[in-house]
Amino acid sequence: MATIMGDESLKLKAYQIEGVNWLVNLYNNNLSGILADEMGLGKTVQVIGMITHLIEKKHQYGPFMVIAPLSTLSNWQNEFERWAPTVNAIVYKGTPAERKELFNTQIKTGNFNVLIVQVHSRRMKEEGGGS
């Protein structure tokens, strides 16, 4: 079972623990899957739990990529800060100049665990951020 590294008062609900364990089981068996719980049931924190498990137990430090709608990027960042503050998660958003700076100073170096991008982030390539 994955541990969450944030505030010790934060606890996953039983069904969220089951979801994290299911994701871990998929990973351990080299299988793919979709976590398709209803809205508001904590899919974000379950994925954070899985990533935390990979870092803590499997020594897989990433980088991992979260692809999400633009409207949820800040929530992803906030949830990483809340539940897994030692995981270096960066969000690829901002003006073209800000994104280029972010790419050149953080993404290009690979000094992060999780990259959070919006669904339509092919801009990264167009802005000199990939091939």
Image (cartoon, helix red, strand yellow):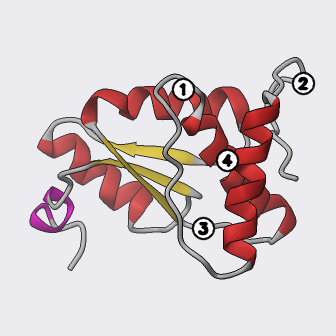
Q: Secondary structure at mark 3?
A: loop
> Is residue 87 one of those drawn in magenta?
no
Please name the residue that numbered disc 2 is placed on. Answer: 8
Residue 51 shown left or right of residue 59 in the figure? left
- The residue that appears at 59% across and 58% down in the rendered structure is 113
> Is residue 124 one of those drawn in magenta?
yes
Looking at the image, residue 54 lies above or below residue 70: below
Q: If you read the primary sequence from the N terminus, does the residue marked by circle 3 or circle 2 appear first?
A: 2
Hey, which quadrant is residue 41 in on the image? top right
Compute the Cα span from label 1 to label 2.
17 Å
- The residue that appears at 27% across and 40% down in the rendered structure is 93
Stretch in magenta: 123-127
Identify which amino acid the numbered label 2 is placed on: Glu
Residue 10 pos. (x, y %) = 81, 21
Residue 64 pos. (x, y %) = 53, 62
Compute the Cα span from label 3 to label 4.
10 Å
Q: Nearer the viewer, residue 120 or 90?
A: 120
Circle 3: is it few (<14), some (14-19), or many (20+) Cα within 10 Å? some
Please name the residue that numbered disc 1 is placed on. Answer: 78
Please name the residue that numbered disc 4 is placed on. Answer: 87
